[in-house]
Amino acid sequence: MSGWIIAPVIIPAMAAALLLLLRRSPNLQRQVSLAATALLWLASARLFMLATEGDVLSYRLGDWLAPFGIVLVLDRLSAMMILLSGILASAVMLHAIRGWDEKGHHFHPLFQFQLMGINGAFLTGDVFNLFVFFEVMLIASYGLLLHGGGPRRLGAGFQYVAINLLGSTLFLFAVGIIYGVTGTLNMADLAGKVGQVSAGDAALLRTGALLLFLVFALKAALVPLHWWLPTAYASAPAPVAALFAIMTKVGAYAIIRVFTLVFGAEGGAAASIAAPWILPAALATLAIGAIGVLASGVLVDLVCFAVVWSMGSLLVAVSLFDARSLTAALYYTLHSTLIGGALFLLSDLIAARRGRWRDDLEPSPAMANATILGSLFFLAAIAMSGLPPLSGFIGKLMILDATRTSRAAGWIWTVVLATSLLVIIGFSRAGTTLFWKSEAVAGALEPPPPARAGSMVPAAILILGTALLSLSAGPVTRHLEATAQQLVTPQSYVDAVLGRPAPAQRTTEMR
Amino acid sequence: MEILVASAIGVLSAAGIYLILRGRSFPVIIGMTFLSYGVNVFLFAMGRLSVDRPPIITSDAAEYTDPLPQALVLTAIVISFGMTALIVVLALRGFLETGSDRVDEGIPKLPEPAEERLTS
């Protein structure tokens, strides 16, 4: 059964190799890439069902025993994240095969390698292996970011590569320190060993844990480490930017995983070490993101800052590290990934229909499909800014409810609600400029842009996803509560990896 | 030997950080390289410094040195080497297309090429 766990890594890897061989026939390449993404989606759905049964499953690569070899671990959280990346990737792929993939070389192989890195990062149970999958993900993302070329992408690409190289170096320092003081890099093994670190090494352990936090915060675009995101995402090709919506979540996932499992409440000298740093940084992220949304003069910049802002909301909930707030954070993760991807796709659709105005927030003559596109943008803006009835509202409500008993509740509520207002203003101004003010502008767009309604399907799928997320909020929340429960009681994870039976745990999980 | 290795890591990291903060792409890349050399030596030292011991655990070996950091360093070297090659090419292309190798002037706001108009 546990052999399935490696499928989300193997499928994109094999597909990427196959796609490289098919580079002379773009049509076949599209079909194979689409089929591989669909297959990945099916495999992740299967894994999701396996994980829902409640047990944590581990897969030992090469059958090396647990603390020595590399393990892949499937629990509810990793299964959910893989399913999410499968859904997002399928929609993005549908969008990309409408023309973007032909703007440069090797789009499809890079796309598959990116998926391999993302899924591997979600599955791995080893800190160094996490580094390797981060690198796979980043190397593919460098290629994807530069897809299509142009001086703007080269400039943004240099900064993006430089900041991530620096992040990787810090990651290695952190891994080195943690290995030096504990003698292991297996996360489950670390969970037991960090408590036994001698008092003399406690400072080193804390340094290592915080360096690791710094790296994950860089990936999650936590202020003040967010400056790379708007530049990089705004210059990336639209489908790539939409796929990148899950990359920030990889950072958030890594924070949740490592700082509940290893440096959680029982982390010895480094117990709950990240929590006091996350909250102020997340509140600052909310503020910067919302101000950025107001200040943007281009739609794609606005979406980028909205993504930064949503990372702030997510990490506010993460910072408490209890079951209720993690449930809220996970719900918000699902919501913000889908809606972030949808908004990037929408801004591309809008830019493609407005001739020389592209996605600048200035009135232009009416664009093609303005009604449908306007409705989709309206729904996406409602969901992103957290107005009822879509999932953003439910997610935000859950976050506010979960933080009610926190000592910083006043701060959290004020900042979350005030920045939500700013984001609503930003989105409504953008929407009126793009869709309503066009009636005042005389003339028509030259040359008449193509008007194919089918191109809006991928964005509509993602928006439909957030609608479903709000309709089925009850079952989803119950599942996420079980997920969060699994996270705050990491013993079942440790037992699954190190191969000890856990009968008592199982009965509480199954309920 | 401890002093030598520790100060080497320190000097490499300090030089790397100084160079990364410079304003042109070439010093930044050299700084990255220094920093990755520093981290490689650091990872190596995390398996404890020992001389003339085999990195293989056999039944008759009285002492051994930790083989894991050596494997980690190998991976790290490969990755940082590839990344350095990529960023060199990127900086070169950026210089040729924009005529500037400044990294502190923001992203050039040049007009988008015509084929950028996506027909979706």
Image (cartoon, helix red, strand yellow):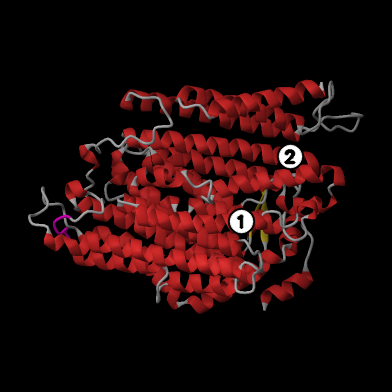
Residue at image position (39%, 32%) is B105
Q: Residue A162 carries which label?
A: none
Q: Give the mark nearer the N terminus: 1 vs 2.
A: 2
Residue at image position (21%, 62%) is A435
- Magenta part, dominant SS: loop
- Looking at the picture, tell me which residue is in the foreground, A301 or B57: A301
Which residue is most to the left? A443
- Tag 1 subunit: A
Lateral position of residue A422 relative to residue A411, left or right: left
Secondary structure beneath label 2: helix
Label 1 environment density (alpha carbons within 10 Å; few <14, some 14–19, many ≥20): many
Residue at image position (74%, 58%) is A494
Counting from the top left corner in percent of width and height, residue A42 is at: 47, 61
Residue A58 in sight in this render: no
| Cα separation between marks 1 and 2 | 22 Å
Residue A139 in sight in this render: yes
Lateral position of residue A159 relative to residue A315, left or right: left
Lateral position of residue A9 relative to residue A75, left or right: left
Which amino acid lies under the numbered mark 2 shown in the image of this protein? Ile
Counting from the top left corner in percent of width and height, residue A401 is at: 57, 75
Find disc 2 in the rendering and name its residue.
A177
- Looking at the picture, tell me which residue is in the foreground, A363 or A487: A363
Find disc 1 in the rendering and name its residue.
A278
- Tag 2 subunit: A
Lateral position of residue B107 relative to residue A263, left or right: left
Q: In this view, does B91 lie above or below A364?
A: above
Q: In this view, does B81 lie above or below A69?
A: above
Q: Give the range drawn in magenta.
A: A364-369
Q: Is residue A28 magenta?
A: no
Which amino acid lies under the numbered mark 1 shown in the image of this protein? Ile
The image quarter containing residue A337 is bottom left
